[in-house]
Amino acid sequence: MTKQTFLQKFIAFNEQKKLASAKKRTLIAVSGGLDSSVLCELFHQAQFPFAIAHCNFSLRGTESDEDENFVQSLAIKYGVEIFVKKFDTKSFAEQNKLSIQAAARQLRYEWFREIKMAQKFDFIATAHHASDSLETTLYNLTKGTGIKGLRGIQAKVKDIIRPLLFADRAALKTFQHKENVTFRIDSSNVEVKYARNKIRNRVIPVLKEINPALEATWSKKMELFDELERLYEAKIKKLSKQLFLPRKNDIYIPIAKLLNEPHAASFLYEYLSEFDFNATQIEDMLQALDSESGKQFLSSKARVIKDRAFFILTTLPEKEFTIQLIQSNESEALLGTNKITLSSVHTTLPDISKLKNNKVAFVDANELTFPLVIRRWKDGDYFYPNGMNRKKKKLKKFFGDIKMPVHEKENVWILESDGRIVWVVGHRLDERFCITSKTKSCIELKYT
């Protein structure tokens, strides 16, 4: 059998994985380095239609501008359309509290998708190859990972494709040399201040002394890990219906079921890692199973709160709104994605004994003093809950009596009139403001 050329391997891999082809339009992310320059040459030789997108991240001064000029020349060489954008990456990273690498990643993929949608490309292609995939797996292992982190880089994730995953860095260099593909050298790739560069330049060379065919060996294992992950996800999906219970906007995790689940750590990690919780935090959660309520575990995206019988996964509380006033001529107040509306009722008064919806309340209009105040509750607040014969109760005690979870307490609104609580919004009306047989007109309050 005749040995396949590198181009033939490229075409076969893309056909097998259903990636690039002569019938699909692909936007290639091109830095100007060896990998992306080789990818352009392969697309050209395979006659796959493509265009180029280049990000100038403004991180290496004149080098970044020279990279941009070089990529412009590639577009002219291949006669293809090019899209170029310059980013102030450092400022974006500082404003969003991201690392430079994370900031660059977010900027480029958001921009790539803008181009794809506007120009109707089928795919966005990056020049990741087998050596990159190996580096990713080793990086994940070093940081701590589940089975998902073992598979390395996938050939296709939605509209992102990696047409070079069949080849390692050495094979790309051989093709580049043979076809005389010109490229730019990124000086930052040899710096060891980045974790991935340390793995690439220091760790992998040592491992290849043990196994020179390291990438090829690992690529086969990655296919196995991919299969194992699918089986594992099927098991996770089945158990998730019992372990992760949606309630409103939160997820409740029964502690009793965790105590009886021998693989609780694995299931928690696979589910909660999507919210940026790490393995150490999962261990801490499991050690807190018998602790008192109120303990919290925070990530960049969410938090887990230990309640009486559940771990509660909830998004981070929204930023505090300033105190709002409702004037006598106003009928609503916006509270983020919610609102309070007021409407006067002058005719037959409602029978509040039949009112079952806590999101609606009727108050005696003559008892209100405008402007009304809307604010978050605070420690020390008290009111006279409707139905308790004018007995005063602190809100903190009230929340405990109705077993309100910790995270829900933080989002409770108070409607106040002249320093007195009118309504614990969505929960209980203050008896001092309830309508009576003497009420001549009332106001309907709705929280939606």
Image (spheres, rainbow, N blue to C red):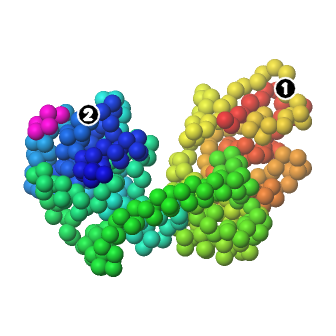
Q: Residue at x 37, y 41 (%)?
A: 15
Q: Is residue 355 above or below residue 229?
A: above
For the image, the number of numbered tags is 2
Q: Residue at x 30, y 33 (%)?
A: 22
Image quarter of the C terminus: top right
Please give the range of residues in magenta: 76-80
> Which circle marks residue 383 in the picture?
none
Q: Amino acid at mark 1?
A: Leu
SS assignment for the magenta stretch, majority: helix
Q: Residues within 10 Å of mark 1 (few under 14, many from 20)?
A: some
Counting from the top left corner in percent of width and height, residue 226 is at 50, 57
Q: Is residue 1 above or below residue 116?
A: below
Counting from the top left corner in percent of width and height, residue 278 is at 52, 67
Query: Residue under circle 1?
Result: 349
Query: Residue under circle 2?
Result: 49
Left or right of 358, for residue 129: left
User: Dot 2: what SS?
Assistant: loop
| Residue 34 visible in the current orientation | no
Q: Residue at x 78, y 34 (%)?
A: 362
